[in-house]
Amino acid sequence: MMGLSLFPGLGYIFLGLIHDVSIRAFIWYGLIVLVSLWGNRLYKSYRPDEMTVKSKDQWYSELSYFYYAFFSLWTLIFLLYVNEDTYNLHYIAIFTQIGASVVASALLSSDRRLFVPTILILMVPLIIYFFAVNQWYGYILAIFSIVFTWVLFYSANSSFKLLMKAEYHATHDHLTGLYNRRYFINALQQMMNALKGTDSYSYLLLIDLDHFKTINDSLGHDVGDQLLQEVTARLKTCLPSRDVLARLGGDEFIIAGHNTDEYSDSKERAMELSKQIINSLKASYIIDRHHLYISSSIGVSLISSSSSDANRFIKEADIAMYEVKARGRDDVILFDQEMSGRVESHLELERMLHFALEKDEIFLHFQPQFDNNQNIIGVETLVRWNNSKFGFISPAVFIPIAEQTGLIIDLGGYIIENAFRTLSEWHDKGIELRQFSINISMRQFFHYGFIDEVKKHASHYLDQKLNETIVFELTETIVAEDIHKVVTIINELKTLGMHFSMDDFGTGYSSLSYLKQLPIDEIKIDRSFVNELNEDEGDQAMIITILKMADIFGLRVVAEGVETQDQFEFLKQFKCDYYQGYYFSKPLSTGDFEKLYSS
Ligand code: C2E
Ligand code: CA
Ligand code: CA
């Protein structure tokens, strides 16, 4: 852009060379060349992507000095040369000035700080010059030039406004008016540039609202949106000046600190700010006459010159934020290397899990279920993974990974098919079961192909009588989802004769009202309650209540994790239906189960 300044500059030299070859003139030419070269150097040093906020400010102030110098020089030369005027001088002046102005106003319209002074510098001397000609045609040309200057301003300004509008939409979030992810990454990159070559740190706060989805689903998106706007307003009041706040999407916000500090100071600042935010967001909200409470989880990462990748620091803050969620939410945690190690091994497992099916490392175990007379009445299918490098890995570890990565769809399909096949083979061998349970993950349950997958394998391996023994175990978290959709899916499979069970009952959100809405047939008392039966009277009361409630709703009850005779006797006394646990049997391979059954 600034290269343009060379253009009129050289125009004047040309003009001068024709009319003046004195030493005085050469001094002027020299000055013009110097200033033009300065402009060119400025132009070349403008690198918006790599510059920090501070160096950009410096650049702009140098630019304005450059404009002053150029303007003064031109004005001086005009005044000096106007007396030696010829027609050539007019043409050259008009040509260089107007040409340059048009190009400049078009090219520089992206920045008001650029096009306003440029147009002024190019057009004002021309107007002065025409007046100074002191002829009738000079006055007319001067007036034309004034009108033309105004037109240039007007058009440059309109395109500037249009550009600003487009820029606003591209860099801001619609709902909250905050910056969006794209802008934020850019701003963060600039902050990181500022840290280059220093030992300083700044902070990054990733803020996620806890259970926002529940509010959104139960009260509607309007209320959810208003809540997000209110949260935004509160975040702004906590925000230190010049820190950058953005919404990454959904209920996730992010802050990048402006000030740089030593490690410990930066850390302290980040923690203090986080606590202030957590407290501020926790105060109650009144939206559409609803009194709402929401807590937040914050992950912190400290930005330094150790990496030039902005996304890495966001990822770190994200890992720390998930750590907060895992430890019960409503808190702040600073990212550390140990966390990153865990993420690494998590990623490694994820990679291995990808090939587990192909490499035939996945198989099923079956834990028998018993009735009051200790007869086997059914089994629960439990998946097993024996990895070549890590050995046996618990489903409690790999099922959540499979859910996060989406692998659960293939894995779940594989489990259903193998479970159905085993059931059918057992039936052929004369093993009669009253129920055959299979665990279903949330993500698998809501997948569009789930119903068809079940139907396909059922028609291949089972008949109506066997269909009726199938029990799908769902976890309680399912009630936090769209309850209408849950009911539709359950009812669709119930038309085949299959049944549904609420797993880990008592640990999650389930309430009586949900139980009434869901067409389930069975609940499984979580093993944590059964486990503490002997010591904890609260748990005894809990189990008695669950059993009574189930009786009222006409639900079957399976107690899981029964490990002692006392636990079994207690449960039997309060009319539990079925039992499952190490007291009776551990999960068994197909062969071991067949042996146990026949004995
Ligand atoms: P869950 O559905 O609650 O399964 C019961 C877990 O309790 C099993 O652990 C079982 O081995 C264990 N268990 C049984 N009896 C006792 C006992 O007396 N004492 C104790 N302490 N534990 C007992 P497992 O097999 O490690 O499975 C853990 C979780 O992994 C399961 O919890 C379930 O949520 C998930 N899972 C297992 N198999 C599958 C599957 O095929 N599909 C899906 N989606 N999830 C599965
Ligand atoms: Ca289960
Ligand atoms: Ca369970």
Image (cartoon, grey):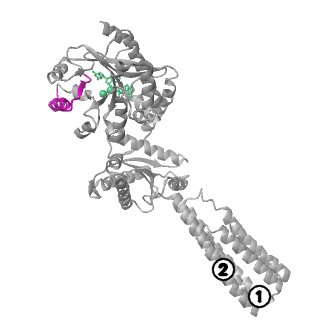
Q: For ligand 3, give the image quadrant.
A: top left
- 71 up-or-down from 330: above or below: below
Amino acid type assigned to the residue bearing label 1 in the image: Val
User: Dot 1: within a 10 Å radius of its alpha carbon, few (fewer than 14), some, or many (20 or more) residues?
Assistant: some
Q: Which residue is denoted by mark 1 in the rendering? A: 82
Q: Position of residue 168 (x, y in %)?
A: 52, 62
What's the residue at 69%, 77% (across, down)?
A: 122
- Whether residues under marks 2 and 1 lie with C-beta atoms below 8 angstroms apart, the answer is no
| Residue 68 seen in render | no
Magenta segment, prevailing SS (helix, strand or loop):
helix
Q: Quadrant of residue 239?
A: bottom left
Please tell me which of labels 2 and 1 falls first in the chain: 1
Q: Position of residue 45 (x, y in %)?
A: 65, 62
Residue 555 lies within the magenta run = yes
Q: Quadrant of residue 561?
A: top left
Q: Position of residue 221 (x, y in %)?
A: 37, 52
